[in-house]
């Protein structure tokens, strides 16, 4: 050991550098559900909370879904979440997932808009209702890497029209351009 230098970490150990205060493990979200064995990421939450569009792209197991849960727990309005579940997931699956989340949250105005606009894609059907809402809505779309090309095209067309102050967060292992 050389004077003035800390000892080398054990072989196979990665040294982590803390940036700012060390977050609490097992933090409690506002909605009462516990995020177990979780290290909160206040800077990442703050960064992803700015603006009305955010994209989270990372490899499997990196904590994308956990970050979405943390974003939801810090949001000051209703949260709608749709998680795609199979390769080639398209508009029909997104419509079902959005419908279930809207119904669960009691957002009957948006649910009605979704149900009456069967000829429109599911997110475009929500736009008129979003523009009339006073509460900021957070829409989380997870596992976007499972979306089919048609759904990806739809999202690409929709992003410029997404109304502020409502927020749309897209997450996946790979977000197509």
Image (cartoon, grey):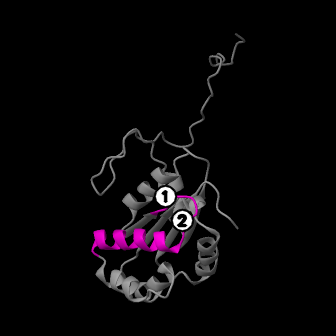
In the image, residue 100 lies at what x, y percent? 35, 69
Q: For the residue labelled by badge 2, is the local secondary structure a helix, a strand or a loop?
A: loop
In the visual, does 108 lie left or right of 24? left
Q: Describe residue 136's horizontal placement relative to residue 88 as left or right.
A: left
Q: Nearer the viewer, residue 73 or 17?
A: 73
- Give the position of the C terminus as an image quadrant: bottom right
Q: Position of residue 154 (x, y in %)?
A: 60, 78
Highlighted magenta segment, given as a residue range: 83-106
Secondary element type, mark 1: loop
**Split into 4 quadrants, where in the image is the N terminus?**
top right
The residue indicated by pointer 1 is 85
Residue 149 lies, with reference to residue 126, above or below; the image says above
Quadrant of the image occupied by residue 47: bottom right
Taken as a whole, is the magenta stretch helix, strand or loop? helix
**Up/down of 36 relative to 176, above or below:** above
What is the CA distance from the residue labelled 1 to the residue labelled 2? 7 Å
Q: Residue at x 40, y 83 (%)?
A: 114
How many residues crowd mark 2 within 10 Å: few (<14), some (14–19), many (20+)? many
| Residue situated in front as seen by the camera: 167 or 177 | 177
Q: Residue at x 32, y 84 (%)?
A: 109
Picture coordinates of residue 58, whole percent (x, y): 61, 51
- 115 within the magenta span: no
Residue in the image at 51% along x and 82% along y: 121
The reply to whether the C-beta atoms of the residues labelled 1 and 2 are less than 8 Å apart is yes
Tell me, yes or no, whether the highlighted magenta stretch contains residue 101. Answer: yes
Residue identifier under label 2: 89
Q: Is residue 30 left or right of residue 3?
A: left
Quarter residue 158 falls in: bottom right
Q: Is residue 44 visible?
A: yes
Q: Find residue 97 and report its horizontal and vertical position in percent.
A: 41, 68
Residue drawn at 29 percent across, 68 percent down:
104
Pick the front one: 29 or 110: 110
């Amino acid at each position: 050991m050389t004077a003035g230098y800390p000892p080398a970490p054990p072989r196979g150990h990665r040294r982590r550098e803390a940036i700012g205060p060390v977050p609490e493990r097992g933090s409690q979200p506002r909605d009462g559900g516990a995020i177990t064995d979780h290290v909160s990421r206040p800077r990442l939450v703050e960064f992803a909370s700015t603006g009305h569009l955010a994209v989270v792209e990372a490899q499997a197991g990196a904590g994308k879904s956990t970050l979405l849960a943390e974003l939801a727990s810090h949001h000051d309005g209703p949260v709608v979440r749709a998680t795609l579940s199979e390769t080639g997931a398209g508009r029909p699956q997104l419509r079902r997932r959005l419908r279930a989340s809207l119904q669960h949250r009691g957002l009957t105005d948006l649910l009605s808009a979704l149900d009456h606009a069967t000829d429109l894609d599911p997110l475009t059907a929500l736009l008129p209702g979003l523009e009339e809402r006073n509460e900021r809505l957070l829409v989380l779309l997870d596992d976007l890497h499972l979306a089919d090309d048609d759904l990806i095209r739809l999202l690409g067309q929709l992003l410029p029209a997404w109304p502020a102050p409502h927020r749309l967060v897209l997450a996946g292992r790979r977000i197509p351009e």
